[in-house]
Every structure is written in structure tokens, then in C-alpha cells.
Image: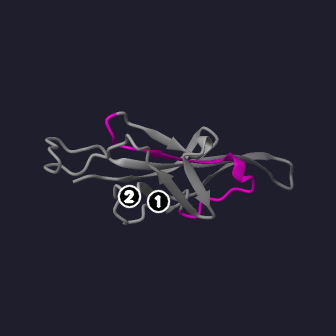
Amino acid sequence: MGKTVKVYTPASIEKEVTFHVAPPKPTFNQDAVSSTTRTISGTLGGFTLDNNNDRVVEVHLNDKDNTILSSKNGQVTINGDTWTATLPDNAKLRQSENKNGETAQPSAITVENKIGDTTVSTRSDEKK
């Protein structure tokens, strides 16, 4: 994803220059989710903004309802470079194929870094 900006040279000639910058990618902690902890967490991969009110982190679960937890709604907390999502009591995450009666590969759990409603980067925890 490139960012195009207008640059003015000393001769006042307007030019467009495109910068390609890799956005910071979120990560998952490898801690197992248990029935007592009910949390998923990770890092934001260095995703910071001058105005952190615009920074949004969404966690897309792979439960039967495809629940989306968002920091915008207080369902995901951000503390520095760390995010933590507490799973709703009724959310049952799908495990890997052939576990808990699964007959098809479950979809991934995905964390998404956003600025407002615009996605900056994502990371998925693929199931096997």
C-alpha cells in the first residue's frame, strides 16, 4: 500500500512521489485460551499514532456467529503496544479439524489494526 504525496521542488514544480511503507503487523501471544482465562492477546507490532483515539483494534473470532470484538466498543483493550480481548461467555472458538467434532478446517482468528474505519494491517491465526 503506497502513500502518494505532493512534493514541491525549489523551482516550484509540483511532482507526485509514492512512498511504500510496510505497516506494523499485529501478533498473537501463544498462550492457550482456556475456559477460565477467556482472553486472547498479542502485540500491535509497533502500531502507534499521535492521536491514539483514532487507533482501533478489531479481533474477528471464528465462533458460529463470527463475532467481531473492537476497541471502539471497549471489547478489546489497548495498553501501549499490547492488545487484549476478553471473549464473551457464549463465544465458543473453533479448534483445528478433527477436534471437538470438527469435520472441516475452521476459519482463522484475525486481529486487525485500523485507523478509524480504514484497515492498516491484519494478522490471522490459521487453524490446521
Residue 116 in the image: x percent, y percent?
Answer: 64, 41
In screen coordinates, is 25 left or right of 12? Answer: left
Is there CB contact under 8 Å for labels 1 and 2? Answer: no
Mark 2 is surrounded, within 10 Å at the Cα level, by few (under 14), some (14 to 19) or many (20 or more) other residues, namely: few
Rendered residue at 51%/57% (across/down): 84
Residue 83 in the image: x percent, y percent?
Answer: 54, 58
- Alpha carbon separation for disc pair 1 and 2: 15 Å
In screen coordinates, is 86 left or right of 7? Answer: left
Q: Which residue is mark 1?
A: 41
Q: Quadrant of residue 40?
A: bottom left
Q: Is residue 52 magenta?
A: yes
Instruction: Classify mark 1: helix, strand or loop.
Output: strand
Q: Which residues are magenta?
A: 45-64
Q: Earlier in the sequence, mark 1 or mark 2?
A: 2
Q: Of all residues shown, which one is farthest toward the right? A: 11
Q: Is residue 101 above or below residue 11?
A: above
Mark 1 is surrounded, within 10 Å at the Cα level, by few (under 14), some (14 to 19) or many (20 or more) other residues, namely: many
Instruction: Classify mark 2: helix, strand or loop.
Output: loop
In screen coordinates, is 113 left or right of 7? Answer: left
- Quadrant containing the C terminus is bottom left
Rendered residue at 38%/36% (across/down): 66
Residue 80 in the image: x percent, y percent?
Answer: 63, 64
Rendered residue at 42%/65% (across/down): 29
Residue 10 in the image: x percent, y percent?
Answer: 86, 56
Q: Is residue 25 magenta?
A: no
- Foreground of the two, 50 or 3: 50
Q: Amino acid at mark 1?
A: Ser
- Foreground of the two, 13 or 99: 99
Q: Which residue is mark 2?
A: 36
- Foreground of the two, 37 or 76: 37
